[in-house]
Image: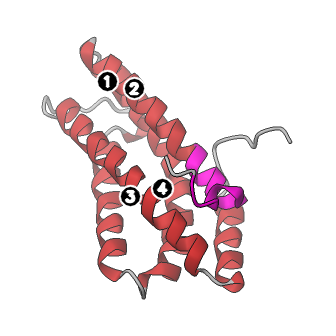
Amino acid sequence: MCEYCGCQSLTTIDELTREHDEVVRLIGHLRTAHQDGSAARMAETAREIARVLDPHTQVEEQGLFPALAADFPDQIAALEAEHRQVETVLGEAADGVTPSDPTWPDRLLNAMDMLRDHILKEQDGVFPAALANLSIEEWETVEATRARAGSTLSRPAA
């Protein structure tokens, strides 16, 4: 995790980072459920991950990414494509459904491996780039997007 540039001193980046941490924690639960052969537990955990990622992705795609896209178009396009891939696999477990496709558990784990790499790209690339490149107005847009999207995590006590 990035801790060298100071970007986590910004509330929005700190919240995005905490959401990343929660997703990584939940991926650990997915692996345990997979080892136990429990597709139902995997589906339940996939829904938890999707619940955390929904507002998180809104903040990135409606706030951070547009502000960085002019300077980093290929990187932002790749990150958005990865979001779609993860959403597709997680979406198969939406609405309380345990996917019956026998390939789904392995496809889910593969998507989560990609997501872990994706998280590192954001924390080591996107967040520091945002700190260095975004104007006050762009940060206000990011913060307004966070306010609209909300978060599934509670804020730490001050």
Q: Which residue is mark 2?
A: 28
Q: Secondary structure at mark 3?
A: helix
For the residues marked 3 and 4, what is the alpha-carbon distance in whole angstroms? 6 Å
Per the image, the residue denoted by label 1 is 31
Q: Is residue 99 magenta?
A: no
Instruction: Give left or right: position of 12 versus 3.
Output: right
| Residue 121 disc label | 3
**Front residue of this view, candidates 132 and 87:** 132
Look at 56% across and 80% down and name the residue there: 133
Disc 1, SS: helix
Q: Residue furthest front?
A: 4
Q: Is residue 116 left or right of residue 56?
A: left
**Of the residues shown, which amino acid type is indicated by label 1?**
Arg
Residue situated in front as seen by the camera: 67 or 124: 124
Q: Quadrant of the C terminus?
A: top right
Of the numbered discs 1 and 3, the one sitting upstream in the chain is 1
Q: Earlier in the sequence, mark 4 or mark 2?
A: 2
Say the numbered circle drawn on residue 123. 4
